[in-house]
Amino acid sequence: MKNSKIYLSPPHMSGNEQDLIKEAFETNWIAPLGPHVDAFEQEVASIVGKKAALAVVSGTAAIHLSLALLDIKSGDKVFCSSLTFVASANPILYQGAEPVFIDSEPDTWNMSPHALEKAMEEYYLQNDLPKAVIVVNLYGQSAKMDEIIEICDRFEVPIVEDAAESFGSTYKGKPSGSFGKYGVFSFNGNKIITTSGGGMLVSDDVEAIERARFLATQARDPASHYQHSQMGYNYRMSNILAGLGIAQLQVLELRVGARRKIFNRYLKELGALPGISFIEELQQTKTNRWLSAVTVDEDITSVSVKQILEHMGEKNIEARQVWKPLHLQPLFEGNRYFPHDDREESVSEHLFNTGICLPSGSNLTEDDQTRVIEQFKEALQKAVVNQVVL
Ligand SMILES: *Cc1c(COP(=O)(O)O)cnc(C)c1O
C-alpha cells in the first residue's frame, strides 16, 4: 500500500514455521523443551562451528548465563562496548558487578582496541583486571576481533561476544559469534531471524554449556524429588519457539542476502549525496547488514538528524537514531569510560549524534525502498529550502 507504515526491521517468516509448530502440537511437545529445542541447538552450533549451544528465552538471558559461568560477582569489573543496546550491559548489573565502558573505533563502529588496551593497562596496574570483556558486533559488522583477542589474551581476560545483531556475518571466514569464550545470539522479533523471542549461548566448552543448561533449568539437582543447592533461573526456550527457529535457520542465508541488497541500494542512491556517509565493510569480513546506517554531517547538509527523523516519521517511515552510548545513560552515571582518542570527540558520541538507521527488513519491497530513498532525499531538500528562506 502506498502510505502504509514502513518498519525498521519487522519479522519475516519463511512459510515453513507453521508446519514445525503443527508438528509440536501433534506430538504434544508444547512445553517444556522437546525435540525441536535439541535440533535447534545442534543446528546453530554446527552453523557457527561450536561444540555446544543452549537455546534460551532471550539474548539477554544468554549474556547473563555467560557472566554467571564466568563467576562474575559483586565488586568485579566487566568491560563492555559503549555503543550498544542496554541489553549488552544489564546482565553485568544482574551479577552486581561494575561495567566499564569502552569507546568505538571509526572503521567498524565497534570496540576500539586502542581504548581497550588503555583500560586494560590501567586496571592491570591497579590489580583489578576485568573478569570479562563483552564485545558487540554492531548492526551486523564484526568488531576487529584479531586485535581485541590479542589484547584479551595478553591480559588473560575471557571474551563474551555479543553477536545478537550479527548472526550470519563472518570475520576472516569464520562465523561471527564464534570468537569469544562464549558467543551470544538473539532471536528477538527485530533481529535477522526470529523465534518471536529467544536467544542462544554457544561455546566450545561443552561442560560449561551443560552447566548453563543446569542453571537455566532452575538449577535442579539430579534427584527424584525437587532438590536445589544453588540459585537458578527459568531461561530455557520452549519447544514451539524452537520450531520457529528451525524454520528460520533454513532461510538465514536468504535473509542476509536480502539485507545486503537493501544496503547496497541505499549506498548507491544516497551514498553520493553531500554530507551523507555509509559504513564500509571491514576487509575480510562479511556483514549481514542487519541495519543499514548512515551518518549525516549537519554542517554540510544543514539539516539535523532530528529533522530527518521527524520528516521520515511524518511520512510513516520508521527510522531511528543510532544507539545512545551506554556511558551517557542515566543508568550508568558514574561508571568509567575509555574514549578512543582523548583529544577528540568520542567516536561513539559522534556516531550517536550523526547516525541514522534506515528501514532494513529483509521483506522490505523495492517500492518501499524507493519510498525510503525518496523521503530521505526530500528531508535533505527541505533543509535547503529552509536555508534559502532564511
Ligand atoms: C537485541 C540485542 C540484545 C538482546 O537480545 P534480546 O533477545 O532482545 O534479549 C543484546 N545485545 C544487542 C547488541 C542486541 O541488539
Image: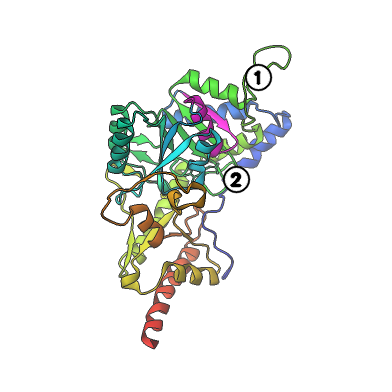
In this figure, which colouring scheme has been used for the structure? rainbow
State which tag comes first along the sequence, 2 or 1: 2
Q: Which residue is mark 1?
A: 220
| Residue 131 position by quadrant | top left
299, 173: nearer the viewer = 299
Quick check: 390 above or below 75? below
Q: Secondary structure at mark 2?
A: loop
Q: Which residue is mark 2?
A: 15
Quick check: 277 above or below 177? below
3D distance between C-alphas at marks 2 and 1:
37 Å
Residue type, label 2: Gly
Residue farthest to the front? 126
Label 1 Cα crowd, 10 Å radius (few <14 / some 14-19 / many 20+): some
Q: In this picture, which residue range is highlighted in magenta?
A: 52-71
Q: Residue at x 51, y 30 (%)?
A: 74
Q: Residue at x 51, y 23 (%)?
A: 209
